Amino acid sequence: MSNKCCCNERSHYFDKFDKILAKYEGKEADLIPILQNIQDAYGYLPQDVLDELCNRTGLHPSQVMGVATFYSQFRLKPTGENLIKLCFGTACHVNGAEKVAEALADELKIEIGGTTEDGKFTLETVACLGCCSLAPVMMIGDETYGRLTPDKARKIIRGFYENRGE
Amino acid sequence: MRIGVSNMRKGDYKVIVGLGSCGIAAGGNKVYDAFKGIVEKSEIPVILDETGCMGMCYKEVLVEVIDPDGKSVIYGEVTPEKANKIFESHIIEGKPVTEWIVKADDLETSEDSFFNKQMRIVLRRCGAINPESIDEAIAMDAYKAIEKAIKTMTPEQVIEEVLNSGLRGRGGAGFPTGMKWKFARASQDSKKYIICNADEGDPGAFMDRSVLEGDPHSVIEGMMIAGYAIGADEGYIYARAEYPLAIKRLKIAIKDAEERGFLGKNILGTDFSFKIKIKEGAGAFVCGEETALLASIEGKRGMPRMRPPFPAVKGLWEKPTNINNVETFANVPYIILHGASEYAKYGTEKSKGTKVFALAGKIAKGGLVEVPMGIPLKEIIYDIGGGTSSGKKFKAVQMGGPSGGCIPADLIDTIIDYDSVNQTGAIMGSGGMIVMDEDNCMVDIARFFLTFTQKESCGKCTFCRIGTKRMLEILERITKGEGKEGDIELLEELCANIKKNSLCGLGQTAPNPVLTTIKYFRHEYEAHIRDKKCPAKQCKALIEYRILEDKCIGCTACSRVCPVKAISGEVKKTHKIDSSICTKCGACKATCKFGAIIVE
């Protein structure tokens, strides 16, 4: 898919990026906040935007990719419509998070880190969501689901599909 | 629009909803909205407000109702439905709903034991103020300590006071805070920095988040005092990106403090100037290490470097820098305002003051607790935490996260101070305290932490990068029943080498969870390796699910819930599990109402 229109003008695709870059001087110290802003705007770090970032700031591609791949927050691929963040913190672990993970993977027919074929869900594990008293916990989008059991987790996923009339 | 306490008229009721991350996760916003709807329609004037973490995470959502005469009642496990009843009964009819009360000024409740042994210094304003209102913070002494420091004390006197208080770094290592400040003060440079390490990365630890969400001003004020003491005019707060609410409230607090002239140039008419910026982390556990944190603020990969030079000499952008964690800073205003001796009243000879713990895992009353140093572990787990949530036998408590270790049940009389905890092989750490019962496999816990550290190793040091990987492989093999004689010794050898040959705290402490579990639960390792048994019945490869013939009534509940159809049997006849198909997910056991399914 080309991001430029037929007359070779920059398409609106980069508008969001232009706005982000305008806020910063583009120095090395700005790199992490810039990448965070790009991810907020595009949902992930698209390669063509990163290329543009290097061209415009003079930051070296190895430097940009080095940072983008070092920190777990950054993703180089888009996620599904709903991102499931299943907590693998200690409190969740001792309360059975692994069993919940298996149930979710089985229900969605994907591996951890994968996205469903219909693009509805991406399943990820995170180190700790910090609501340990509700363990085991997961977040889908901004909503938190606590005191999970494998069965409850499956029902939540089914609920998503049913509510949308599918 | 939310109305602060300053607008409260005499004779008004006040309803305060706990909206820390825990409260929100439990549905706090829905409860807040329910009250909002009721209050808007009500003829009785009621002030609706929010606050941060009240500590009793196990009873979220928490709602406090303050009577016109100032009496307070806290309700637990409030839902939008319960909001109606609370409003009607308590506020309209004047009859508090006794059965939902978890804490009250003039009523004893079964939950009082949660607070009786606590001492709140760091959390002095958490849960008591609206964290988004600087007025409420000021009404409870915020920014009085910085005023005292810059108007009546020299920087040297401030450092002396902090030294005398005995305050040690609450990030885990326990280095004396005053000493750190002294080194940074001694560095000659026109530019210096203060950094607040809010990269709370230990899984199962949420102390710093709760402080930032509940009382951001205490941290800002602590940083300012440190800035005055070492001669810095700029500070950074390096916060986990996973803490959006903490970051939001910090931003509001910084803006409010600037508008009131507490932050900025010539603060309170003195020569002292100070500004604070927030840097959001991007998800790397190693950035909790101070030199890695500095690299990350500078926009680089967060990898640690050799020390010396220490940050106090060469830190952020090569300038002298003092780094403390959130809880350490939150202690400082109290020390300056009330004096070192008042603070040092609490604690043991070498560990003064209090410590905040995030009590979680298999604990009945999990939450955020602050206790005086020197309290026995037993009192935290039983008197405050109410024992295990399962009612089963307490087995061990994990302290210090991936850098810490497991303290077994027979050492439960250990007192909480840096040195006593270190003696067990665990560390005080930043304050995560995960309770485990007899169902938790200690080899599995060791494997869990190694999975974490192995993933988070930045890769710079060979022993940490490859050593943790090899350890993880051995632990995985043991939990799969493929352990070999000599594996324990091999683990111990790797542990010793990783500790010795890693540059930073991550590698140096990564073996601790393994070493302590071998030390106290060697028999569990041996059972996995020699007998191919998991005594806690957790490790899947070593267990089997079986249906007891005399207990099964053939209700078919288990076969219906089995995701892989491994259970067969006719109605009203004994069922059977085909272990060649069974994935050991445990769904059947959780469903069976007759206790007919056992794990062997």
Image (cartoon, helix red, strand yellow):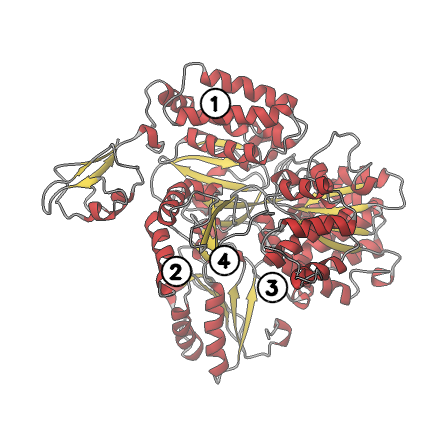
Which residue is the site of mark 4?
A141
Between the residue at mark 1 and the residue at mark 3, the CA separation in whole angstroms equals: 45 Å
Name of the residue lying farthest toward the front: A6
Between the residue at mark 4 and the residue at mark 1, the CA separation in whole angstroms equals: 42 Å
Residue A98: % across, % down: 40, 41
Between the residue at mark 2 and the residue at mark 4, the CA separation in whole angstroms equals: 12 Å
Tags 1 and 3 on a common chain: yes
Decide: is B598 above or below A74. above
Tags 1 and 2 on a common chain: no
Q: Is residue B112 visible?
A: no
Between the residue at mark 3 and the residue at mark 2, the CA separation in whole angstroms equals: 37 Å
Of the residues shown, which amino acid type is indicated by label 2?
Phe
Q: Residues within 10 Å of mark 4 (few under 14, many from 20)?
A: few
Image mark for residue A160 = 2
- Identify the subunit bearing mark 2: A
Of the residues shown, which amino acid type is indicated by label 1?
Lys
Q: Residues within 10 Å of mark 1 (few under 14, many from 20)?
A: some
Which residue is the site of mark 3?
B129
Closer to the camera in the image, A139 or B99: A139
Closer to the camera in the image, B506 or A27: A27
Question: Which sits earlier in the primary sequence, circle 2 or circle 4?
Answer: 4
Which residue is found at the position 47% from the left and 43% from the top?
A88
Helix, strand or loop at mark 3: loop
Which residue is found at the position 45% from the left and 43% from the top?
A112
Decide: is B498 above or below B48. above
- Identify the subunit bearing mark 4: A
Q: Residues within 10 Å of mark 2 (few under 14, many from 20)?
A: few
Closer to the camera in the image, B540 or B590: B540
Which of discs 4 and 3 lies nearer the camera? The answer is 4
Which residue is the site of mark 1?
B519
